[in-house]
Amino acid sequence: SHDFKCAGLDKCCFDRCLGEHVCKPPSFYGRNVKG
């Protein structure tokens, strides 16, 4: 898990567009995002 690199409750997930792991807020996962 890479969550320790993120501030607050943000989660670290791999962004295929950026080609790297990025921090995203938990609410991000509530949207229709496939990947």
Image (cartoon, grey):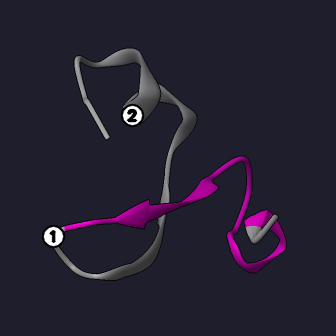
Q: Position of residue 13 (x, y in %)?
A: 52, 59
Whichever of callouts 1 and 2 sits on the residue coming sooner in the sequence is 1
Of residue 18 and residue 5, the one placed in the foreground of this image is 18
Residues in magenta, as a range: 3-16
User: Image quadrant of residue 4?
Assistant: bottom right
> Which residue is at a point 72% across and 47% down the rendered structure image?
9
Q: Secondary structure at mark 2?
A: helix
Position of 10 with respect to 18 (left or right) is right
Residue at x-position 28% and y-position 82%: 19
User: Which residue lies under the disc numbered 1?
Assistant: 17
Q: Residue at x 74, y 56 (%)?
A: 8
* SS class, disc 1: loop
Quarter the N terminus occupies: bottom right
- Under mark 2, the amino acid is Phe
In magenta segment, residue 4: yes
8 w.r.t. 33: above or below: below
**C-alpha distance separating marks 1 and 2:** 16 Å
Instruction: Please name the amino acid that badge 1 sits on.
Output: Cys
Taking the spot 40% from the left edge, 16% from the top edge, the residue there is 30
Q: Toward which corner of the image does residue 2 lie, by quadrant?
A: bottom right
- Residue 14 within the segment the image draws in magenta: yes
Mark 2 neighbour class, 10 Å CA radius: few under 14, some 14 to 19, many 20 or more: few
Where does residue 6 sit, x and y in percent of width and height?
A: 68, 70
Q: Mark 1 Cα within 10 Å, few/some/many (few <14, many 20+)?
A: few
**Position in image of residue 15 (x %, y %):** 32, 65
Pointer 2 residue: 28
